[in-house]
Amino acid sequence: MNIKELDKKYVLPTYARADVEFVSGDNARLVDADGKKYIDFTSGIGVVSVGHANKRLNTAICSQIENITHTSNLYHSAAQVNAAQKLVDASAFDMQCFFGNSGAEANEGAIKIARKFGEINGEVKKYKIITLRHSFHGRTITTVKATGQDIMHNYFGPFPDGFVYADAIQDIESLIDDHTCAVMIELVQGEGGVQPQDKKEVQVLAKLLKSRGVLLIVDEVQTGAYRTGKFLASQVYEIEPDIVTLAKGIGGGVPVGVVMTSLKDVLSAGDHGSTFGGNFLSSIAVCEVMDILKEYEDSSKLQETTSYFNEAVAKVYASFPSMFTQKVGIGMMCGLRVKDAETLNSILSKAKENGVMLLKAGKNTLRFLPPLTITKGEIDEGFNSLNNALSSL
Ligand SMILES: *Cc1c(COP(=O)(O)O)cnc(C)c1O
């Protein structure tokens, strides 16, 4: 049986996979099973932040696992403490970390912290969490409910109570009541369509929440790890959230989720945990990814790459005015609104045919989420292929 048949026979059909099997990679390059080469503008949905087969990351992981991979959270771990220190230092927030294994799990942790905070502070139990309509917060039962899109709430119920949806940032204030413990937002909605929030509106919201004693949770699972130009999008927006969640790009491909919070004494021993979370393997990956990306930012390479990439996106936008309606995004998280969903699907498959991999976001956004370490040569090659694809449509 070939891979397609084996997949069909043994793996649950939860994904509509593209018909391609990648077998190797090198920074922003991918090679499929037939030896065909591609430029990768997806980085595995924002995960491979330091590129495919990154030598430094691989060396760090290999030398760690030659010693020890996992002992559980019952014991101290230098790798975990080092990872936490690097994350806190890069954020410049006075926070502490909890390590899990995915974005959804990080958000679950954030929700638990907010709920316990709401339960132990004040006379009435505060448990409601306001999220946005076009948000995406994960696939567990609770994070599916935290996600504001109705289409995600088919089946699977009953869901946990207490999630309230706002259509936009300005509508949040009117939804706050005595039972509201937190507001959870993405600063740039990723899955929702690469939609950045307005900086001023977010700053006004942050101030309002502080004055009302309502926590601000920023889901940085996609925006974090230098994706939007700084370590956190919260730094780009110049706000100080109470809780930040991270995952995707922070492990460079090793599964890891992180909750960071300034609420250091809400959870106590036994309130929360994870068997795998923060083990030597994932923690050493976080340490090395953070070192690589910090150097990349400090040397201005991140800013150079970001400008170069965005100029290329702008050029495509200008060259095909009949196809695209808007350029959206921040930093290395960008997109082009396509006139309709059908055209977007043909762009994606033509691009793949021409050797460049791209993503979809929302119904009609062509999403670019390249490795942050993509080179100018790789950018040129990828956009050359994309231009050929678009011209042939
Ligand atoms: C991807 C994503 C998640 C879910 O992350 P998983 O690792 O798939 O659980 C949550 N929030 C945002 C903003 C995301 O982009």
Image (cartoon, rainbow, N blue to C red):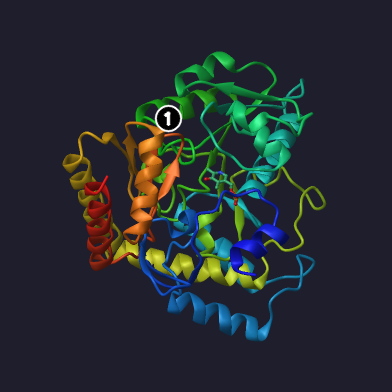
Q: Residue 92, percent across and down?
A: 46, 52
Q: Which image quadrant for residue 30?
A: bottom left
Ligand 1 closer than 8 Å to label 1 CB: no
Decide if residue 349 is on the left or right side of residue 77: left
- Say few, some or many: other residues with alpha carbon within 10 Å of mark 1 (under 14 / 14 to 19 / 20 or more): some
Residue at figure coordinates x 73%, y 31% from the top left: 155
Q: Residue 314, percent across and down?
A: 21, 44
Judging depth in this view, the residue of 251 and 139 nearest the camera is 139
Residue at figure coordinates x 77%, y 24% from the top left: 125
Decide if residue 236 is on the left or right side of residue 218: left
Judging depth in this view, the residue of 39 and 342 nearest the camera is 342
The quarter of the image holding the N terminus is bottom right
Q: Residue pushed farthest front?
A: 1
The relative height of residue 290 versus residue 119 in the rendered view (above or below) is: below
Q: Residue 360, percent across and down?
A: 43, 44
Residue at figure coordinates x 75%, y 57% from the top left: 274
Q: Which image quadrant for residue 149?
A: top right
Residue at label 1?
Answer: 202
Residue 229 visible: no
Residue at figure coordinates x 33%, y 35% from the top left: 337
Q: Which image quadrant for residue 346?
A: top left
Residue 382 visible: yes
Q: Across the whole image, how many numbered discs are drawn on residues?
A: 1
The relative height of residue 302 versus residue 240 in the rendered view (above or below) is: below
The relative height of residue 91 versus residue 133 in the rendered view (above or below) is: below
Q: Residue pushed farthest right?
A: 270
Inspect the image, locate mark 1, and give the three-letter code of the amino acid beneath it.
Answer: Val
The quarter of the image holding the C terminus is top left
SS label for mark 1: helix
Q: Residue 235, percent across and down?
A: 40, 45
